[in-house]
Amino acid sequence: MESSINLAVMEWPAGKARLLTHEKDPKASWDAVDWSPDGRYLYAVRAVGTDDADVYRVEVKSGAAENLTAHAGKVLMQASAVSPDGKTLLMSSNEKGGYANVALLDVASKKRRWVTDTQWEAHAGGFSPQGDTFTYILNADGRAAINFVDGKTLKASDRGVPAGLNTPGAGPTAFREDGSYLFSHQDSTHAPNLYLLSAGGAVTQVTHNESPVLTSATLPSSQLVTYKSFDGKMISALVWVPFNLKRDGTAPVVVMPHGGPTGQTLDSFNPRAILLVSRGYVVIAPNVRGSTGYGMEFQKANYKDLGGADLKDEIAGVDFLKATGFVDTHKVGIWGGSYGGFMTLMAIGKNPDLWAAAVDEYGILDWYTMLQHEDARLQEYEKTLLGDPVADKAVYEASSPLKYIREEKAPLLVLQGERDIRVPKEEAEQVVDILKKEGRTVDAVYYPEEGHGFIKREHQVDELTRSVGWFDKYLKGETKAQ
């Protein structure tokens, strides 16, 4: 089964599609970026795996592809937009020490002019209609700022956009002809909404997605913390603490590992964290080794060690909270989905005495059964994390919760979509069957018509209500009806 992704163009209005690329490498995928102003070329990115990519110019008529960023070794070269005059590509690359930085690529000479030099993550945005201004997004420890850059001087400004998690509201077309700019903004206490930044610098809210209850409520904001893990590596995390919490060591705590593993917990409006903190829980969401946002070395630091040192980073977060004097060391829970669900299963199996309750949402139990049931693209992704399934058999086994799950003690709630093709239902069923045979406390809900994550509102409500009820019962000792 081929897993390659190719480029195609559709003739309009006939609706006939024609392939532009004919990829042979199953690890490779093509992603369209932008058209040249004259429509002759399509700019695209060809990625091989998760750590190597180039920018191409593809002639639409012939399909001839020209590599504009040829390089040695594994480097990510990605583009976002072409200038209105067609001469310049706005792009980002991690060739500077593995950290994503923004550059302007002259299409004719293929030379790059660097715009940023950061050890966070800077991602290319879009050009203004006149081409005199462009944007990039700076992700600094999970908070994203939009920077507006003068095309001549390369001087950047945030133009007064409020701090938080900001992204272009409509991709490269976020700029409007009158000089205004549409963007999405959220933070830990404000739900995502669209805002308009006028040419004069005024910010106006365009949408109002939040409910009246949230609008009138005062919510605890997240706090960004860093702590040392077991080997001295510094780990960033977001922490939510209830208002007026007494430092008497009685508060329950829930750890929220993120998905991925090549992902990152951003400082967003987090319904799970808000739900828990409003009910008296301290919440911590660490960005452990293997996370994006901190350079390629950090991102690859859990290669062939999934659920190893990265799990120790999660546990170090619990130790950090213990030292604050707020939390009860006997009331520690963990709640994660996808790779966070995998981390949940690894945690309760490898460190059974730490956890008092757990919620696993569509988590991986066995990397071998995942290989059998997941789609071809994910099979290739899994190999980039764990190696060859034959040659690295010991790695796959050591990194599978299946090896440890019979040691768990924490009551476990399993939530799974019936039609999940990323982490198939078989993973959840294995967990439940094993723990029931062991006589452990386990419950499971399989949501019909749902995939990898739950879309239907009634299922989302049930997911949150059921999960918090689980923690209330096993961390707080409350026995009210679920």
Image (cartoon, helix red, strand yellow):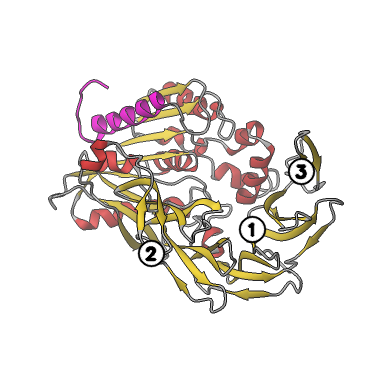
- Element on which disc 1 rests: loop
Q: Of marks 3 and 1, which one's residue comes earlier in the chain?
A: 3
- Element on which disc 3 rests: strand
Task: Report the amino acid beneath label 1.
Answer: Asp
Q: Nearer the viewer, mark 1 or mark 2?
A: 2
Is 254 or 188 nearer to us in this picture? 188
Q: What separation in Å lies between label 1 and label 2 (alpha carbons)?
A: 38 Å
Residue furthest to the front: 178
Tell whether position 460 is magenta. Answer: yes
Seen at 67% across and 59% down, the residue is 52
Query: Disc 2 marks which residue?
Result: 201
Q: Which mark is residue 369?
A: none
Q: Residue 51 carries which label?
A: 1
Task: Report the amino acid beneath label 3.
Answer: Val
- Residues in magenta, as a range: 457-482
Q: What separation in Å lies between label 3 and label 2 (alpha carbons)?
A: 39 Å
Query: Disc 3 marks which residue?
Result: 9
Dot 2 alpha-carbon crowd within 10 angstroms: few under 14, some 14 to 19, many 20 or more: few
Seen at 56% across and 58% down, the residue is 300
